[in-house]
């Protein structure tokens, strides 16, 4: 898929998913968020950039950690995600939190203006991850660090068949190379290619729990990256896709109607080239 088309698919796809993403995925991706925030070791008063922030699942906890003396900016390609997150920040009365629509490969912020950059499960969707990682480095102050989380290896993510199932019903790749960054040391290699130093990877297992088939299907088709393609399906196509997906996750049925689907996350901690490391971010 050409980069411009991929960005367009992601932008409008996440607009479609915005109203249900947090409800259907928030609990399931909590282990990755928790480790990312631990490794970031944010301090009161720091300035933080959250790239591909989505509904603010990392942005708002980051804001709690830096406090009103700090600043947190969340950026996302989706207008709807930015709109909803901005509204939530206003509802909470968080004057030190803001959201803007930006491309991760072309961040519209000044050089050396943040102490930390976070990216939770967003880098997989970027056409050129190395360029995005270079942008993250550019906006960091001396001594700044980045913490990036991606999904792990395809064979360790039990829901992975959602992509070929959808791709078999549309004329484009919904999310090409989704699991590439989580395979082996690829994420480390990409970050090093972008100039990051002391890149450290950690893998964690997770279980995606869904109460029943309807919840599992909604998460896979409505709450994630295939939402735009799914929106184009007629009822017959949806029914056949649902059936095929449920068959693919049948091995993960629990007693009763629920599902416990395995997943894996990779979390990378890195530092801006030439600045050394801060031990507190890995303690």
Image: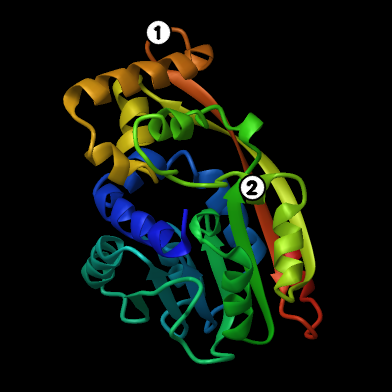
Q: Relative to 55, does residue 278 appear above or below in the rendering?
A: below
Instruction: Specify whether residue 111 is in view.
Output: yes
Residue 119: where, in percent of width, then height? 54, 63
Nearer-the-camera pick, 265 or 106: 106
**Residue located 70% across and 44% down the image:** 183
Cα distance in 3D space between marks 2 and 1: 34 Å
Residue 77: where, in percent of width, then height? 37, 66
Give the SS element for disc 2: helix
Mark nearer the viewer, 2 or 1? 2
Residue marked by disc 1: 256
Residue marked by disc 2: 180
Residue 54: where, in percent of width, then height? 38, 59
**Residue located 36% across and 77% down the image:** 97
Nearer-the-camera pick, 50 or 136: 136
Q: Relative to 84, does residue 252 appear above or below in the rendering?
A: above
Instruction: Specify whether residue 42 is in view.
Output: no
Q: Which mark identifies residue 26?
A: none
Residue 240: where, in percent of width, then height? 30, 18
Q: Residue 204's quadrant in the figure?
A: top right
Quadrant placement of the C terminus: bottom right
- Residue at the outermost top position: 255
Give the SS element for disc 1: loop
Sequence order check, earlier mark of 2 and 1:
2
Left or right, 220 with respect to 144, comes to left
């Amino acid at each position: 898929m050409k980069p411009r088309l991929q960005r367009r698919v992601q932008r409008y796809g996440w607009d479609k998913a915005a109203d249900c993403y947090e409800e259907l995925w928030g609990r399931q991706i909590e282990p990755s968020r928790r480790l990312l925030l631990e490794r970031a070791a944010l301090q009161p008063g720091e300035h933080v950039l959250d790239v591909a922030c989505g509904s603010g699942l990392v942005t708002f906890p980051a804001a709690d950690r830096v406090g009103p003396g700090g600043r947190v900016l969340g950026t996302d390609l989706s207008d709807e995600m930015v709109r909803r997150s901005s509204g939530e920040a206003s509802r909470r009365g968080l004057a030190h939190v803001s959201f803007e629509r930006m491309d991760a490969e072309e961040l519209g912020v000044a050089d050396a203006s943040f102490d930390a950059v976070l990216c939770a499960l967003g880098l997989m969707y970027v056409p050129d991850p190395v360029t995005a990682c270079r942008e993250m480095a550019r906006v960091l102050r001396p001594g700044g660090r980045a913490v990036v989380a991606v999904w792990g290896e395809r064979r360790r993510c039990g829901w992975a068949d959602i992509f070929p199932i959808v791709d078999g019903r549309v004329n484009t790749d919904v999310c090409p190379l989704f699991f590439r960054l989580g395979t082996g040391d690829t994420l480390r290699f990409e970050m090093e290619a972008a100039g990051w130093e002391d890149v450290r990877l950690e893998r964690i297992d997770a279980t995606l729990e869904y109460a029943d088939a309807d919840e599992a299907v909604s998460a896979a088709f409505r709450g994630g990256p295939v939402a735009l393609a799914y929106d184009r399906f007629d009822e017959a196509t949806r029914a056949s896709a649902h059936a095929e997906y449920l068959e693919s996750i049948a091995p993960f049925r629990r007693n009763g109607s629920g599902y416990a689907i395995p997943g894996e996350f990779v979390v990378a901690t890195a530092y801006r080239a030439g600045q050394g490391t801060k031990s507190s971010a890995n303690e």
